[in-house]
Image (cartoon, rainbow, N blue to C red):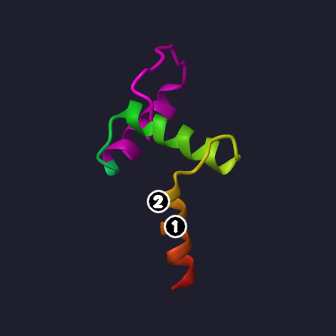
Amino acid sequence: MSLNKKTFVLRITEDMFKKLSKWADDDFRSVNGQIEMILDKALKDAGRKAVQKEQVSSKNSKLLK
């Protein structure tokens, strides 16, 4: 990820924040880090962000097992 990060306000319900917070805690991340991870995965899954080469080869090797 880029070191230059854009700051913005995100308005979500208290319930959604609690669920994100629990998920983040389970993954040993901050809520902000969890949201970044979710958005990064969504961009990759939608074909809007290139997947790094090492991640592709790792996924391919898992498929071959």
Local SS, label 1: helix
- 11, 46: nearer the viewer: 46
In which quadrant is the N terminus drawn? top left
Give the alpha-carbon distance from disc 1 to disc 2, as whole Å: 5 Å
Q: Quadrant of residue 21?
A: top left
Residue 26 place in picture, x, y as percent:
33, 51
The amino acid at mark 1 is: Ser
- 11, 38: nearer the viewer: 38
Q: What residue appears at the point 32 percent right and 41 percent down from the top-left corner?
A: 29
Where 11 sits versus 21, above or below?
Answer: above
Question: Is 36 contained in the magenta span?
Answer: no
What segment is highlighted magenta in the picture? 1-25
Q: What residue appears at the point 42 percent right and 35 percent down from the top-left corner?
A: 18
Residue under circle 1? 57
Local SS, label 2: helix
- 5, 36: nearer the viewer: 5
Q: What residue appears at the point 54 percent right and 41 percent down from the top-left corner?
A: 40
Furthest residue in direction front, as rendered = 53
Residue under circle 2? 54
Where 14 sits versus 38, above or below?
Answer: above
Where 49 sits versus 6, above or below?
Answer: below
**Contact? badges 1 and 2 (CB < 8 Å):** yes
The amino acid at mark 2 is: Glu
Q: What residue appears at the point 70 percent right and 46 percent down from the top-left corner?
A: 46
